[in-house]
Image (spheres, rainbow, N blue to C red):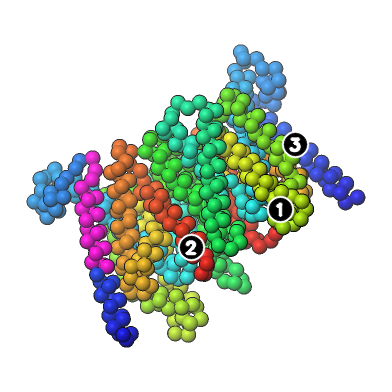
Amino acid sequence: MNVKEQSEIRRKRAIAIAIALALLGVSVILFSLNTGSIRISPVNVIKALFGYGSPEETMILYEYRLPRIIVTLLAGAGLGVAGAVFQGVSRNSLADPGILGIHAGAAFGLMIYVSFFRAMEGPVTLMIPLFTLLGGTGIAVIIFLLAYDRYRGLMPIRLILVGIAIEAGFSSLTLLLSLRLDENTYAFAARWLAGNVWGRDWIHVWTLLPWICVFMPLIFYRSRILDLFALGDEIAAGMGSAVNRNRFVLLMFAIALSCASVAMVGGIGFIGLAAPHIARRLVGAQHRYLLPVCAMVGLVILVTADTIGRSFFQPNAIPAGVVVAAIGGPYFLYLLFHKKKTSL
Amino acid sequence: MRKLEGNIVYAAWLLAAAAGLAVSLFVSISYGAKELSLTTVWSGIFHYNPDITSHQIVHDIRLPRILGAALVGMAFAVAGAIMQGVTRNPMADTGILGVNAGSTFVVVLCFAFLPNLSYSALILFSFLGAALTTVVILALGSLSPGRLNSLHLTIAGAVVAAILHSLSTGIAIYFALSQDLAFWYAGGVAGVTWEHLRILAPIIILVILGAVSMGRSISFLSLGEETAMNLGLRVQYVRFIGLAIVVLLAGASVSVAGAVGFVGLIVPHIARKLIGVDYRKIIPLSAILGAILLIWADFAARMVNPPREFALGAMVSLVGVPFFLYLARKERRSL
């Protein structure tokens, strides 16, 4: 079997898996649309989507359920891809924007936004991702400065350790800041940190959508560069890649993607960790296939987690981040001790 | 001669710390929503008269809470010191390694499912949670092939803590315990009463006395397992007792104050800087310094935005995080 045939097989496999995941995603979304305090049967959901439902059902779907689910699926996809980029660029299989503390920075940015504008609705929400991005970038700079060793470069384990600590510190700072505002903001910040999907209006969809639409294709376009990173800095440089510039650009894109996503769904960790690992098992390490599959896996995980949090736990829905952490945390531990033998 | 000098330094620091503790106690009792003069505080404590309002404030509101903060600070600091010695990990702390989170998790479960539990039963459950998490984390550590790597253990502990914290949050939200949400997020000593103290104080003080008597063995253990064995130490036995002390202290503290991290990390390092590596001295000094740290952290948490309270744990981690980062950069230096 020659190389061409092999790559052909891989391509077919990737397409088959993508189709399967897409079907899974659609069914999860339909199921999620169906759950809530008022149940609507799947047939009626589809009817209402195409404009043939009863006015009541149409209103529930379009005004309440649909925006929330679109926010969730966009954010899930964004977090999955961001995680893949983090792992690819740092060659660190434990990297995740949540664990690295980027989300804590985003939370801090969000609090600064709230103290300035004091509005979570209306057109001014379009500014939210800018603030979370600012916070996330600030944290990223701090973490990379602290984890950088003059002789040994960026040390993966130290990166995680510093990330965990920074996360604890900035979460406290965020709570401190939110306390200065009022009681509701404090409760909001506390819930946000636990990973609560709070974006549920169309304006939140419009806030998130452009970020996903811009940065996702920009990252996909660079999938070949990500493949080169896997070979190591020296080889990547030898293959003609401007290693440092590309690393910086890709990291910025990934931070933008994850900060915009968590701005709407709260500090959800472990998706950016788990999605790339699952995707790698499914389609291998080639980023051309890996990235889209990652997006789908992230989408399925987050929509499922949100649905579980909303539907199984009535009447007080638990945040999606709790569901994700309950499953993703043990997975992280497994990876931590499993991978140790090979390389870290 | 060197030894004598060391002992004098130690005695001097111990005295200074005790004086600092006394000052902290009085100052933090006298300031608050209503300011009281130091003489009022003095007479409120030693000549308590239930008919005077300011005496009531001192006796019923401020004193239990501040004694609670002091006891919890002592317990966490000593637990951290022992954990650092036993696991030979300079970044060990009951908060970072997830012991507090395990204890909190079980306490939250109790609040959700057994709301009318008496305080003494709650403390037992809290011990149980701390013990289970300790076992899980050490098992995870020993599962990893090769030497027990302190960095991996720290990360594993942090992730276990994150999972349990997340689950506790979920339970608190689901069962609408959110009026106490701040407590579950980051701890606090606002709710400590005399009834709590009557159970808590004997446990913590006895266990700390036990810990002080273990000081010599833990100093040996901190030299490394082989050295300790050559010095005639029963390594497994000492390690087991040490961890049991950690579990008791963390469990007792969490049951009143919630998960307060970083105390056990910072304080032993400061003690070590002041008086050297002998755990016979580190443990008592850590106890007093831990009490001072938490009294001031609680003071700050009360004063930052009165009359509302700020989460105590978050207050401590504002100081603790930079310290942890400093240690993480120096992690290869020995204990």
Name the secondary structure under disc 2.
helix
Question: Tag 2: residue type?
Answer: His
Name the secondary structure under disc 1.
loop
Spatial distance from mark 2 to mark 1, Cα to Cα? 28 Å
Q: Pointer 2: what residue? A: A338
Q: Pointer 1: what residue? A: B222
Please name the residue shown 26% across and 52% down the image: A69
Spatial distance from mark 3 to mark 2, Cα to Cα? 48 Å
Question: Tag 3: residue type?
Answer: Ala
Q: How many marks?
A: 3
Residue A170 percent coordinates (x, y): 51, 51
Instruction: Give the mark nearest the N terminus, 1 or 3.
Output: 3
Same-chain status of marks 2 and 1: no
For this orientation, the residue located farthest to the right is: B1
For the residue pair B187 and A94, the one nearer the viewer reads as A94
Question: Tag 1: residue type?
Answer: Ser
Point out the stretch of residues depicted in magenta. A17-37
Q: How would you rate the neighbour count of disc 2 (Cα within 10 Å): few for under 14, some for 14-19, many for 20 or more?
A: few
Residue B74 higher or lower than A49, as above or below: above
For this orientation, the residue located farthest to the top is: B51
Choose mark 3 or mark 2, whichever is in front. 2
